[in-house]
Amino acid sequence: MNTRQQSKLIYSWYGKPMSSDRKLRTSQYKGILITSESSRTETCIQLGDFILVEGVNADQPYVAQLVDLYEDGAQQKHAVVQWFCRLEEIPQNKRKLLKREVSAQEVFFDQVLGYDTDIAAETIIKSIMVLPLHLGEELPIITLNKEQTFYVKQSWDGKCFKVLSPDTFSKLKEASKKRGVITNSSKAFIPSDTLTPVKKETESVVRSATKPKNACMEIESKHSASKFSLAKERHSQRVANNDIKTPTARKKLELNSPTRSKGRLLGCEVLGLLDDDCDAIAPLEPSATKRKVKFTSELLGSPPKIPCSSDKSKSTPETAEHCQRFSDILQLSPYTKVKDFSEKDKNLHGKDDNLSLVGYQKPSSQSPVLTPRSRRTCAQKTNALIAEQISLLKSHGKLVAEEDFLSGSDSSYSSSSEEEEDDDVPCTPEKKSKSSRIYSTPKSSKKPAVHTPAKTLKKTPLPGTPRTPRNATPEIPRRVQAAQEPASVLEEARLRLHVSAIPESLPCREEEFQDIYNFVESKLIDGTGGCMYISGVPGTGKTATVHEVIRCLQQAAENDELPPFQFVEINGMKLTDPHQAYVQILEFLTGQKVTATHAAALLAKLFSTPGPKRQTTVLIVDELDLLWTRKQNVMYNLFDWPTQKHSKLIILAIANTMDLPERIMMNRVASRLGLTRMSFQPYTYKQLQQIVSSRLKGVKAFEEDAVQLVSRKVAALSGDARRCLDICRRATEICEFARQKRTPEMVRMAHVTEAIDEMFSSPYVNAIRNASLHEQIFLKAILAEFHRAGVEEATVQEVYHHHVALCRMEGLQSPTVSEIMAICSRLGACRLLLVEASNKYLHVRVRLNLSQDDVMYALREE
Amino acid sequence: QHRHLLELLKRTTVHGESNSALIIGPRGSGKTALLNHVLKDLREMKQVTENLLENPFLSGLLQTNDKVALKEITRQLQLENVVGDKVFGSFAENLAFLLEALRKGNRTSSCPILFVLDEFDLFVHHKNQTLLYNLFDISQSAQTPVTVIGLTCRQDILELLEKRVKSRFSHRQIYLMNSFDFKQYIKIFKKQLSLPAEFPDESFAQKWNNNVQHLSEDKTVQDVLQNLFHHTKDLRSLHLLLMLAVSTVTVHHPLLTAADLQEASRQHRTDSKANIVHGLSVLEICLIIAMKHLNDVYDGEPFNFQMVYNEFQKFIQRKAHSMYNFEKPVVMKAFEHLLQLELVKPLERPSVRAQREYLLMKLLLDSSQIMDALQLYPNCPTDVKQWAASSLSWL
């Protein structure tokens, strides 16, 4: 969501309504005009065009074909589309069905029924190209505007991939052809009488063709300089186009178009033309290209590959083209900063990979169409190598060198283009005017290049010394030695009794499991949203059950029994602040990292607007009560989203208290939570027994009675399964200690009792018994004072008198006040006493933290 | 206890089992010493050292909130977002990062981590107990093996834990008590005082150790020790006492005597407030006595300066022969001095509205302390002493 995209876009209909439906009060149109206010550009999208549609994630717009455009009774503009899906949108587990590598530019004809094909026209971003290909066909090499062109080979209906049916294929082909015609024709039919309209129109048309939005913003700023020359150039093209309707002309167009700095060239067009004309190019270019090769080799100390390449004359057009690309990127670079360099490298590598695939197939298929491609491959490889070499140079030097190289190549290109123009000149009668105009081309392409060094140098923060390594991978170092496997039965049992051990099934929670499962399943099938509130004391298996449900659902979705869904989990305890919940949810859903307020806004937008292809989201909110804020807006939002019509959000909220909605939630929040509640009862002793024994299945380590004792004890106290397991685990340890003498390896009653005693024994009595004499006397004095005053609170001064009296009775040396204070604070630290802050000295008030009877009991034993 | 803890840690390191435990015991009962000892033993074991046990050590007194604690953990673990001993990023980021880091590991492959939380009770007061919840949650789930060990002196620590945090804690508590009797105490005393065998001057070490042995059988020394033992079983106070005694040892006075110990004990036991009284002027003493009488008459009710002054005036008019009748501002000055020494404490903050003479005060001394101090006070006029002894006799 950068600022550029926030510039206002105005959507208006193109032309008059084609037909209208009285009853539905809709009227249909054949095109839509998108006007950007800030850049004053207009884009016209017509029926049959391929478009990008705003998606969940700003970086990943959806691809679609425009099928219908209409305006409904409420003046809302709607569009009906045929979706294409990217590989990323296909569930991970289905991707393997494809059994082949898929490039980032490939999309699938989407035949999944669940998606809404009716979208708001305002979500259309821009138009693009989608080319149908046969399955066996290789992806054509795209030289420019990678982002703008997609390819379709197969269709996807939610379950499997299919080859495109012939009629779809032809339809798509037609659509893309038509599109090509439109762009071509619009180029061809520009009237040449006035220069300014030409300029404007060419611009808008060209833009409508393929230009990415940001590029257009950028070009805006720069255009004042290059506009004029561009228009001229275009003009010349047109002239050429009109005059010589031969491949040469088209080739020239194609060779010229790279000079139009931005990614305007339709890659497909280039390719098609290239295939046609590759033989035509060859004879035209030797002089230019040779010179160029020399030039580059001089410039870079060591690119031995270019001279080495088998056919110079043929590879060099490609290098020339590459230089274009370089210059393109360079022109972009002031805006995209240094990271462009790395990106560029990456791009090159990526292409290189793609191309190398093609390269491998060269030997097998020697068709003339492929040969130039393979040539190009090696040329691109060399280029990639050059880029790499450059990047290896040191940061500063690198920049400079690259600048040099690029500007150099630029000039070399311009010279070659000039050369080429000169070659053309004899062929056409109108060449005089044209060639004179052509001189502007180098200027236009050079100008930005001249600007760049200064800009890039200024704007580049030096790479290296990253302050915060954002991309640090959170990881704990691996252990050197592998963990030991359990050796004895007891160890095995202990391992299974650990809370973290995941049991195969969850005994005693079958009903709850079924309820939750049914709830989520029904919502999933309906495609609606809803909330469920789950409560229960700690350790009753709430989270475990919910996770189990999700696991089962995911499995079902994998087996195509259920529509696929996204699963997000947040835990109130693991958030530092309730508002961080938004951030986490958004990160789960889209992978973006933004601030809390921004995330809230994005999520609200996401859930409240009808998303075209939205999967249902299942959100688990653990420890719900911690998301409480004073205004409760976090909870309000969470429970408000599912009630939105299009949200498809299912929330499972988990908390401890049963009456949480009534207790802490405002009415409006509680009412949105709805009445679907479920409470997990504490386990009974039988259930606990079953849990323990199911975990110990197959391991004979516990006596029946021992397990029963533990479960009864825990069930009487809390019904916390965790506690139960912990006691059992401790019992195995005790048993192991004791085992040294005896052989039988069974946990008996005695061990369990010991473990229980250890866990539940009150520490106070023990602590008092081990206290020093005066501490005990002090406690006695407190008791006496309480007895005297009848109030369970006394000041140290009063207790002191009693203490001294007691000491006299016992025949001990009575302590000083300082010593009494020390004793008092020590007992306070152990929390046997509750003591006020000590600055009141003698008037500190003292209370017992345990019952008087306990103290009496502990002291009497002596 | 030692064996229990050792076993526990060994299992974490060797088997990769997650655990949590609390070591509870009063101050000076050797909690940290026990832990350090166990860790030392653990490091000596071959298996463990190979597994590279990491242990972030956090103290509740240093890491006062979860944010600081998290940063400290990541710093001590040397995770990848540490830049030159410093951790950047917001609290939320750090938490997410650490959790992610710990989640990635599993039982068999990642290196076990031992978290030591000193002053565990202070961590309990952190907001929502987020850190504790997360640490215990990790120890209860199949993530990186961790052992969380808390050290605290509070017996009621479990009641401070929130219920879900409590549920996740394994309830393994190791109680440390000073459960030795007096004989062992004497033994400890001997051991602490004896010179080690590797002491360079052997003949002196021999002599010194003999002397210590002799001392431990001495009656007066035993009395001193018994007294201390009755007061507290904390070994740190024994150290303090011995420190005082040993610091008297010089070249000319090479061996410790029973008298030294007695002297040290006396110093150790002196009442701090009574000591202050010794340094007061006669006027100030008189004021304190007046306050004491007021306390007796009104049974501990607070008083103000005017009341004290009146009481003092009465004494001057009726009885005093040796005392000069000071003017009120002078008496006020003396009273303020007592206030500064914190022998007297105002009940509320001095405010602008209330005049200083009428601020309600309380005496921070017990009558027995005052009497003791008067006995020792040099050159105390007899009539003042008499006045102090009998509050009513002069009427």
Image (cartoon, coloured by chain):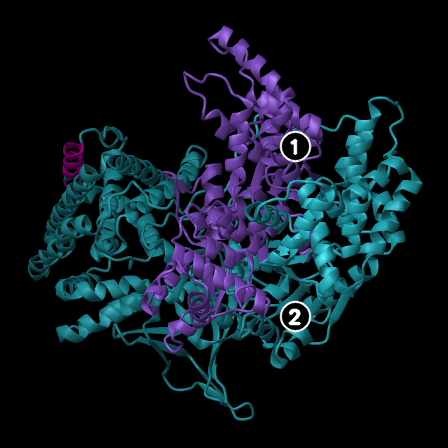
Chain colours: A cyan, B purple
The residue under label 1 is B226
In the image, residue A434 above or below residue A367: below
User: Which residue is more in the foreground, A112 or A318?
Assistant: A112
| Secondary structure predominantly adopted by residues drawn in magenta | helix
**Residue span colored magenta:** A288-300
Q: Gap in Å between the C-alphas at discs 2 and 1?
A: 80 Å
Q: Residues within 10 Å of mark 2 (few under 14, many from 20)?
A: some
- Looking at the rendered structure, which numbered label has been put on residue B83? none
User: Residue A607 in the image: x percent, y percent?
Assistant: 54, 71
Question: Which amino acid, by three-letter code, is at mark 2?
Answer: Gly
User: Residue A53 in the image: x percent, y percent?
Assistant: 45, 67
Q: Secondary structure at mark 1?
A: helix
Position of residue B267 in the picture relative to residue B316 (left or right): right
Residue drawn at x 17%, y 65% as measured from the top left? A223
In the image, residue B252 above or below residue A799: above
Residue furthest right in the image = A705
The residue under label 2 is A527
Q: Chain of mark 2?
A: A
